[in-house]
Amino acid sequence: MLVKLERRAHPSRVMVAGAPLAAAVLTILGGSVLFAALGHDPVLAFHAFFIAPVSDLYGLGELSLKATPLMLCAIGLAIGFRANVWNIGAEGQLIAGAICGGGLALYVGPSGGALLLPAMLVAGALGGMAWAGLAAFLRVRFNANEILVTLMLTYIAGLFLSYLVYGPWRSPTGFNWPESSDLADAARMPRLLAGTRLNLGIVIAPAVALLAWIFLARSYLAYSMEVGGLAPKAARYAGFSQRRMIWLGLLAGGATAGLAGVIEVSGTIGKLREVVSPGYGFAAIIVAYIGRLHPIGIILASFMMALFYIGGEQVKVTLGLPSAITGVFQGMLLFFLLMSDLLIAYRPRWTGMRRASVRRPSDADA
């Protein structure tokens, strides 16, 4: 049996826009099959994973809390991806932002005033940009692969954070736990809803998405980046600087990821710990593609991915399943999206059975 893939002359725009929704539906169906295979009632498991976590105000606050870093990281990555700049190290840039913003708060201490929190946000964004800038410099100077460089820098950032919280920044009153002292009140993100942990970050993230939308829709620089990503030869002919696109694509991802890191430290955690992110920077890659590299789509996709995180925590408690179920759902979502994109761009065509040719012996053989 042979199936041949033929490129479609005009892929359906409706299907392109609806592919993320189809991937989400297929993920839910695949998850139901998975729950049944594990011996759980699919209906009860579905309720525990998707409904129960957001059935009250606290759950909605947790959903928004986890959507914030996903949204910020994915927005910056989408800018680079449009120019074919493959930043895979948003997780490391998030950690760098957390170190810079949190370190500033620890240095200033309780004496910080109203300007401390804005200064922390700026420091976090600059820290993420500096970490991404290392990859940009290596790419434009030595033509190093930014995929490998940004990925490897993630592990360096994580190890450097471990050194800090195990060493010079470890709290003297923390019973030797690898964490810093609590941040001062002036360094904490304001809470928005009583009885929840929802903070000002949920306002900052959509605001950054709106600015990104304006930049991508109205900016000549964004247009040159998109042309460079779609048609590199045409971009070079038009005089668009490839180096500038690399720098901008990586620095944009670093800035938003660093901002996400300092918001996590100042809003959710309240201190620096050995682990400040459960993998938001890596999950943001899926969010960017689910959102079709568009800020509005990314906002919606970030909430869906956040639901996977809190749903995984819920079924861990209620059903006794491992928290790794979150990664399984993330992987299924990406798989079904890629499959949908393949079928949108290519048409499978049945070519029938290939018959084995048998050569009859001739007189010459005899």
Image (spheres, grey):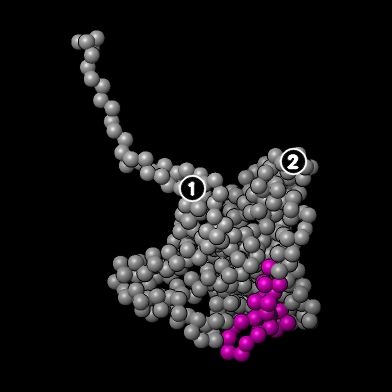
Indicate left or right for 141 with 27 as reference: right
Residue 163 appears in the figure: no
Q: Tell me the element at label 2.
A: helix
Q: Quadrant of the N terminus?
A: top left
Residue 356's place in the image compared with 318, above or below, is: above
Query: Is 203 a magenta residue?
Result: yes
Q: For residue 28, which quarter of the picture?
A: bottom left
Provide the secondary structure element on which disc 1 rests. Answer: strand
Extreme residue in the bottom direction: 194
Residue named by callout 2 = 236
Viewer-proximal residue, 17 or 204? 17
Magenta part of the chain:
185-209
Q: Please say if the residues under marks 1 and 2 sit with CB atoms less than 8 Å apart.
A: no
Residue 208 position in % (x across, y down): 70, 69
Which amino acid does the dot numbered 1 rest on?
Tyr
Give the image quarter of residue 114. bottom right
Of residues 347 and 74, the one nearer the viewer is: 347
Within-10-Å neighbours for mark 2: few <14, some 14–19, many 20+: few
Name the quadrant of the C terminus: top left
Q: Which residue is mark 1?
A: 346
